[in-house]
Image (cartoon, rainbow, N blue to C red):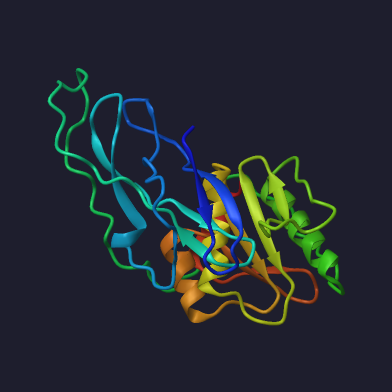
Amino acid sequence: MESVPVRCPACGRGHAYAAPAYPCPCGSPTAPPLLRGAPAEPLTHRTWDDDWVTVRCAGCGRLDQWPQPELCCPCGTVLRVPVRPVTAARTDTPAPGADTAAPPDRTGAVGPSHIPLPRTAAHPRPSFHPTAIRTGRDAVNAAARYLAWLGYREITQPPERPASRIDLRAAGVVAQVDAGTRPATPRDVECLWLNALNASAAGVFFSMAGYTEDAGARADGLGIPLFVLDPTGTPQPVNSPADELISTGA
């Protein structure tokens, strides 16, 4: 896996970064080729056009759109890692049956505002029994109990909060639990999304203080379920991905 040195211009911290690989429709693992020596830039404004880069599969030659490589520095700065641009079209013949259709259009607008979905899980679950939240650890425990109620297994909690701010991990999911007094921001949502991408897992966000309007819109666009934890320890869904998660479970 190709890795490049990345230095955060905000805090000066150095990182070794490797872009995550995703399977091409032909089956070959494909990752955006990183541009060695080019400085990473802090992400201060996000658009859907900039969230995707064109990548050519080395196996079949297919051109498709892949997530722009990003790194969330422990200082909180989201860094956009430069990618080598796609060169002229290949002269060799694509593999038989390879799909050479144009890449899908991913420049659509952010998803709609929160509309609760019917709570019609395929396998009915018993009622969730919350426990009161008095400390930050209580909030993490409440979120862990809720993920287990949704059907996730092998949930683990680190003894101390890691720099990634991922408080809970389970098979197929990572979760962030914000017990602070300020609403979560778009950057908080984006860092969770990047960590979930790197772990090839779904991301779920729990917050005691809620979310800014921009954070809610960003989560809708990225498909991140958002929950608000009330003092009783009961997570309340605040966007459509959260309602969908409740309906389908893990």
Counting from the top left corner in percent of width and height, residue 133 is at 84, 72
Which image quarter: residue 182? bottom right
Q: Where is residue 72 in the image (x, y as percent from the top left)?
A: 56, 59
Residue sitting at x 31%, y 50%: 53
196 on left or right of 97: right
Q: Can residue 247 be seen in this view?
A: no
Residue 245 placement (x, y as % from top left): 56, 55
| Count of marks overlaid on the render | 0
Q: 248 or 227: which is nearer to us?
A: 227
The answer, for residue 222, to whether it is visible in the render is: yes
**Looking at this rendering, what residue extends furthest in the top direction?**
96
**Outermost residue, front direction?**
37
Task: Examine the image and state in which quarter residue 160 appears.
Answer: bottom right
Q: Is residue 236 above or below residue 20?
A: below
The residue depicted at 23 percent of the width and 33 percent of the height is 62
Residue located 32% across and 31% down the image: 25
Q: Residue at x 56, y 72 (%)?
A: 238
Classify 25 as above or below 144.
above
Compare residues 217 and 238 and report the one nearer the observer: 217
| Residue situated in front as seen by the camera: 88 or 106 | 88
Q: Where is residue 137 in the image (x, y as percent from the top left)?
A: 84, 64
